[in-house]
Image (tube, rainbow, N blue to C red):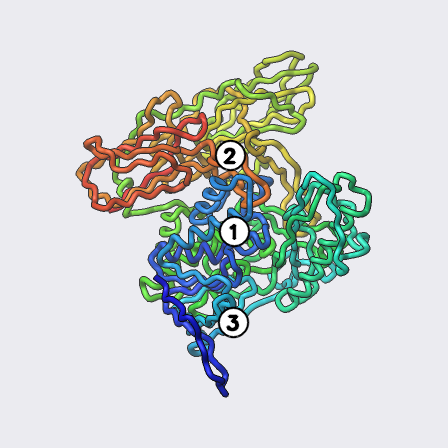
């Protein structure tokens, strides 16, 4: 029970200044900043055993993704509008996104607040301080932080926070700045790092802030009287004719301002200008007479704080640059990945004559090195979120929230290791850090989990059945080939299979088929043509066309069987979906100006569900890519192959079996399911067609060697399920039964691990 407050308090006059109530907290890690990066760092560290204080100066968590700003969380999937397949971030941020979609497919930002708060409150190792601003940093010597002082305006309490380790994820880097850590603000010249996309002075050196608004139809006429500070002359905005009654929220990200100001100290000035713009835009929509369909609309919500894109960036032991992103450079200390475009905006924002952004993509995802996540000259300070060590150009890609959250999970895991072994951030054991991250569900491109403690690595693996891809039934809609269409197939080293497709033809024509691959194995940009065929077709339905290219490949990879655009042809699709299988459409081409250090290539992207069906097809020989042994390969998602065990769809009780030569003592079992890492689970506004992805195993059961049930879950929707047994299980056999899936899909399992 809380202590009851006395009926009355009376204190005499004091000639001295009264001191605020002060509370000292001693923990292992202090995280300042409760955006997605800080939240994921805190959760990861706490789950790894560290005692954490999470300090957030706002009333909710999430930063720009919270209900206060309402920007959708995005990362490498980029709305599924680039060539980064199966690229949704893993670990804690995946857990959060999957949970949000389960509870909140409508994309309500208020519900997303509750998901974040619940995750943090569920962790006993986290002390959460909301409405609390860090404002004083104290040092121990020149290169170490001793404590941080923070003030909560709601309970008028000062917190004196002591720890051996600190993480600044505050956005502007208040702790890092006060500590004296080296930082940059603005854009590097093209000469410093050889970045050809470095902006000119005319374009500007900082990205600005944005404020969003929502409208609502009340079903009756609504009057709007603008405040006197609203923008009067809408033509001050060069693109004012782009405004309409249908677009609101963060789809109006280009209502941006402040790139020519000090984005730290002039944020309030920037906010007032953005309010001026937003209310001026709404006055234009409501009162100009150009939008009669706005009569019943009211302004439901306007952000009270701006979403800030850029301010300080602090220097780590390395700094990512444009070439790291575009060339997909590899790093020995890779701990996460990015895949958003290099997305720079004109500094004049909404008042610029230029387009709202310049976005240039790499041909695949890129690695993020751990050395960007701690300050090079403050030895116990991690730098998380958008203040991480990157150049301005690279920042154009790394700055998006899910990329930052993904990287910050490495901060949390590294902090736990440092506390466990008495290390400083610079001195972590990288192999252990990478292993521990992948154990927690992190995907690191180019790496697979090699876990000597995993008992499954020493088990014989079998299954009741496995899927053999002979083809997919012709039971779906037709797809007009107004754009080229491709079926991705996982092909083992050796001859490429022969594939039959079915088409309807309106008029006699010549259909071109192409077999394509990615120049870089592990990418999904089909920029190498291995073979081509021109097939003469008469008019008529249900015609079979055969793609037979007499081509062999040297490595396992995805190949792209392409039906090139032809206005006379409609391809037959299949309603059968399958883990690790996607069809794509040629969406557009990236054609950058010369000499900006960016590649030209085509974008082939999957339509979102409920569309996005595979092509109906027959395959010879069958593709044998769904073996039960895939569950121990340490990948957990499709890469150059499916990497999952998939059961035969006719199997009445799909069962994976593990058998050891002698009994083993098992305390923990970890299962990895298919939550469709290709789907971009935007946190707000976009919405999703389902609560649970159709590939998900929703009901599973684990049996021991005697057939006794060890664990069971009947309502699963999460990617990773962990079973921690109260007492060790001693057995030489385990069986995992996959009893139900969300959709009419063959049951699949990406991974199983067992630990003593």
Residue 346: name its quadrant: bottom right
Residue occupied by mark 1? 403
Task: Answer with left or right where residue 745 lies relative to residue 339.
Answer: left
Q: Earlier in the sequence, mark 3 or mark 1?
A: 3
For discs 2 and 1, the disc positioned in front in the rendered view: 2
* Residue at image location 53% in from the left, 26% down from the top: 614
Whether the residues at callouts 3 and 1 have beta carbons within 8 Å, the answer is: no
Q: Which residue is mark 3?
A: 135
**Res. 446 visible in picture:** no
Residue 585: percent from the left, percent from the top? 60, 31
Q: Report which quarter residue 583 is drawn in.
A: top right
* Secondary structure beneath label 1: helix
Name the mark nearer the viewer: 3 or 1: 3
- Count of picture labels: 3
Is tag 3's residue or tag 2's residue first in the polypeptide sequence? 3
Q: Is residue 607 left or right of residue 749?
A: right
Sequence-wise, which precedes: disc 2 or disc 1?
1
């Amino acid at each position: 029970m809380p202590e009851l407050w006395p009926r009355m308090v009376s204190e005499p006059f004091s000639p001295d200044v009264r001191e605020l109530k002060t509370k000292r907290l001693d923990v292992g890690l202090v995280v300042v900043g409760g955006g997605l990066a800080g939240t994921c760092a805190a959760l990861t560290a706490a789950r790894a055993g560290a005692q954490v204080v999470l300090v957030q100066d706002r009333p909710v968590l999430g930063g720009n993704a919270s209900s206060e700003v309402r920007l959708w969380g995005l990362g490498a999937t980029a709305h599924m509008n680039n060539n980064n397949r199966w690229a949704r971030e893993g670990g804690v941020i995946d857990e959060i996104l999957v949970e949000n979609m389960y509870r909140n497919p409508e994309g309500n930002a208020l519900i997303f607040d509750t998901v974040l708060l619940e995750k943090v409150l569920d962790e006993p190792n986290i002390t959460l301080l909301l409405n609390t601003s860090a404002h004083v940093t104290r040092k121990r010597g020149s290169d170490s932080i001793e404590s941080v002082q923070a003030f909560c305006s709601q309970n008028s309490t000062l917190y004196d926070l002591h720890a051996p380790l600190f993480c600044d994820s505050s956005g502007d880097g208040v702790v890092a700045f006060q500590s004296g850590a080296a930082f940059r603000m603005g854009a590097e010249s093209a000469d410093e790092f050889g970045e050809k996309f470095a902006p000119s002075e005319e374009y500007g050196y900082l990205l600005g802030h944005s404020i969003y608004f929502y409208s609502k139809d009340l079903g009756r006429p609504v009057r709007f009287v603008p405040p006197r500070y609203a923008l009067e002359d809408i033509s001050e905005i060069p693109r004012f004719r782009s405004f309409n009654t249908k677009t609101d929220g963060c789809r109006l990200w280009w209502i941006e301002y402040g790139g020519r100001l000090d984005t730290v100290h002039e944020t309030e000035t920037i906010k007032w200008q953005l309010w001026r713009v937003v209310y001026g835009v709404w006055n234009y929509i409501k009162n100009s007479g150009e939008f009669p369909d706005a009569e019943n609309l009211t302004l439901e919500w306007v952000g009270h704080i701006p979403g800030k894109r850029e301010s300080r960036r602090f220097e780590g032991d390395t700094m990512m640059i444009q070439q790291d992103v575009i060339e997909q450079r590899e790093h020995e200390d890779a701990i996460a990945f990015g895949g958003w475009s290099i997305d720079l905006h004109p500094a004049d924002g909404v008042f610029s004559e230029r387009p709202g952004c310049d976005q240039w993509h790499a041909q695949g995802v890129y690695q993020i090195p751990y050395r960007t996540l701690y300050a090079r000259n403050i030895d116990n300070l991690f730098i998380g979120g958008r203040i991480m060590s990157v150049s301005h150009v690279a920042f154009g890609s790394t700055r998006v929230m899910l990329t930052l959250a993904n990287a910050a999970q490495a901060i949390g895991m590294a902090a736990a290791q440092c506390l466990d072994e008495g290390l400083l951030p610079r001195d972590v054991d990288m192999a252990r850090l990478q292993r521990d991250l992948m154990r927690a569900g992190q995907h690191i491109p180019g790496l697979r989990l090699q876990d000597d403690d995993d008992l499954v690595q020493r088990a014989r693996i079998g299954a009741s059945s496995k899927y053999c891809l002979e083809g997919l039934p012709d039971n779906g809609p037709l797809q007009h080939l107004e754009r080229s269409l491709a079926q991705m197939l996982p092909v083992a080293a050796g001859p490429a299979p022969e594939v039959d497709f079915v088409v309807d033809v309106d008029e006699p024509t010549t259909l071109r088929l192409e077999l394509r691959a990615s120049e870089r194995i592990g990418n999904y940009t089909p920029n190498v043509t291995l073979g081509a065929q021109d097939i003469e077709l008469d008019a008529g339905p249900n015609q079979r066309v055969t793609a037979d290219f007499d081509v062999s490949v040297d490595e396992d990879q995805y190949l792209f069987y392409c039906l090139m655009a032809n206005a006379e042809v409609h391809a037959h699709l299949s309603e059968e979906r399958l883990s690790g299988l996607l069809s794509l459409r040629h969406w557009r081409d990236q054609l950058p100006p010369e000499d900006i250090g960016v590649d030209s290539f085509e974008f082939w992207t999957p339509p979102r569900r409920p569309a996005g069906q595979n092509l109906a097809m027959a395959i010879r020989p069958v593709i044998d890519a769904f073996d039960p042994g895939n569950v121990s390969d340490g990948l957990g998602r499709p890469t150059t192959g499916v990497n999952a065990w998939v059961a035969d769809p006719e199997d009445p009780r799909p069962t994976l079996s593990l058998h050891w030569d002698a009994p083993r003592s098992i305390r923990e079992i970890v299962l990895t399911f298919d939550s469709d890492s290709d789907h971009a689970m935007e946190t707000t506004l976009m919405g999703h067609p389902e609560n649970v992805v159709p590939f998900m195993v929703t009901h599973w059961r684990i049996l021991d060697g005697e057939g006794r049930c060890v664990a069971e879950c009947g309502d699963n929707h999460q990617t990773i399920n962990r079973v921690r047994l109260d007492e060790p299980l001693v057995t030489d056999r385990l069986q995992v039964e996959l009893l139900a899936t969300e959709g009419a899909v063959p049951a699949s399992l990406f991974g199983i691990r067992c630990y003593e």
